[in-house]
Amino acid sequence: MRWWFVGSRSAQSAATLETLLRQGVVPDGVFIDGPDYSGSIAQGVIPPLIRPDVSPGALELAATQGIAATSGSPTQLQQLVQGNRPERVLVSCYPHRISRLLLTAVPQGWLNIHPSLLPAYRGINPVFWQLRDGHDSIGVTLHRMNEIFDQGPIIDQCRFSLADFPDYGMINRRVGQYGAQLFLAYLENSRQEAVEGVAQDALVGSRQGPPQERDFAVDPDWSAQRLIRFVSGVRGLATPFLVDRAAGKLLIEDAAFANEARLAAPLPGKRLIHCYDGNVLLQILGEESE
């Protein structure tokens, strides 16, 4: 089976590909959204938008395995798919719509890893909205792609806990890892029988747009765990804040449970929040006037 991997310069894409490579499941080609750096990669030059000192991106991972890899526009993706004719494509965090022409050009279809339990949280940045709504876990769905974003038949789903309060990058890496495991299970099952998936009801579920600045405000009426989970989870995406009547907007760097010792200690640069089920100590980056 000839198959391709399509993604972006994201933690999710890199984690998906890394997990598959560790299991010996190697794509015939890799395409990453962005400027065309295929020539640089072939010569061992790292594109300037990738920081391997933080974590290897999908292009670097492909280069280490000798996989044909390139980066470019949706038009370039179309040309590559039509020229190489993969039988199947796995997508992880690719930000563009796949045209009907490309969907029908791949015989066994396009599969996508989506970070929610579809049909809930279709649309943009479902990880953020699950954090915003107070979920203590993140869903992952492997589904077939069709012409409508996030509405293709569902193949498999799972979820993982946020009990250790991971940051945004770690959450997205876990989405990639769990999504890769769903794909591996799909490959195993498809050896025995065709796996078409379960059709979604377009009238069920939810769809969100991009988060706005106001959506990063924390609410003292939340539980202590929810507040800490949100502050930790959006770290790396944007800076959460607390609106204080006297001080204005307080930018939050970190949040943790406040024990008795902390309650008795001086709190320079910190703010104590009394939630209904416990106290939270916020580390404040600074203030912004309203």
Image (cartoon, rainbow, N blue to C red):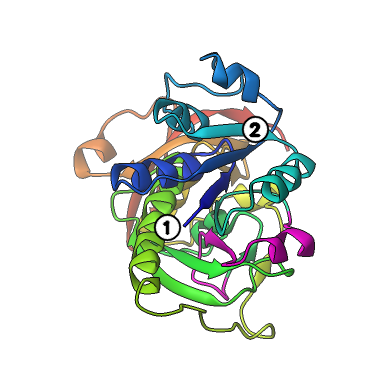
Instruction: Please name the residue shown 53% across and 33% down the image.
Output: 68
Q: Nearer the viewer, mark 2 or mark 1?
A: 2
Instruction: Please name the residue shown 51% across and 79% down the image.
Output: 197
Residue 79 part of the magenta segment: no
83 lies above or below 98:
above
According to the picture, the residue beneath numbered tag 2 turns out to be 71
Q: Which comes before the other along the chain, label 2 or label 1?
A: 2
According to the picture, the residue beneath numbered tag 1 turns out to be 179
The Cα–Cα distance between marks 2 and 1, rounded to whole angstroms, is 22 Å
105 lies above or below 200:
above
Q: Locate residue 244 relative to residue 252 in the image: left or right.
A: right
Q: Locate residue 154 relative to residue 160 in the image: left or right.
A: right
Question: Residue 185: where, in percent of width, then height?
Answer: 34, 66
Nearer the observer, 162 or 191: 191
Residue 100 part of the magenta segment: yes
The 10 Å Cα crowd at callout 2, few under 14, some 14 to 19, many 20 or more, is many
Image quadrant where residue 204 sits: bottom right
Is the residue under label 1 in contact with that under label 2 (CB below 8 Å)? no
Q: Amino acid at mark 2?
A: Ser
Nearer the observer, 220 or 174: 174
Question: Residue 124: where, in percent of width, then height?
Answer: 66, 56
Instruction: Please name the residue shown 79% across and 43% down the image.
Output: 75
Mark 2, secondary structure of its residue? strand
Q: Is residue 47 visible?
A: no
Span of residues in magenta? 97-120
Q: Amino acid at mark 1?
A: Gly
Q: Locate residue 181 relative to residue 1 in the image: left or right.
A: left
Image quadrant where residue 261 sits: top left
34 lies above or below 21:
above
Instruction: Please name the residue shown 73% across and 38% down the image.
Output: 290
Question: Residue 130: where, in percent of width, then height?
Answer: 51, 62
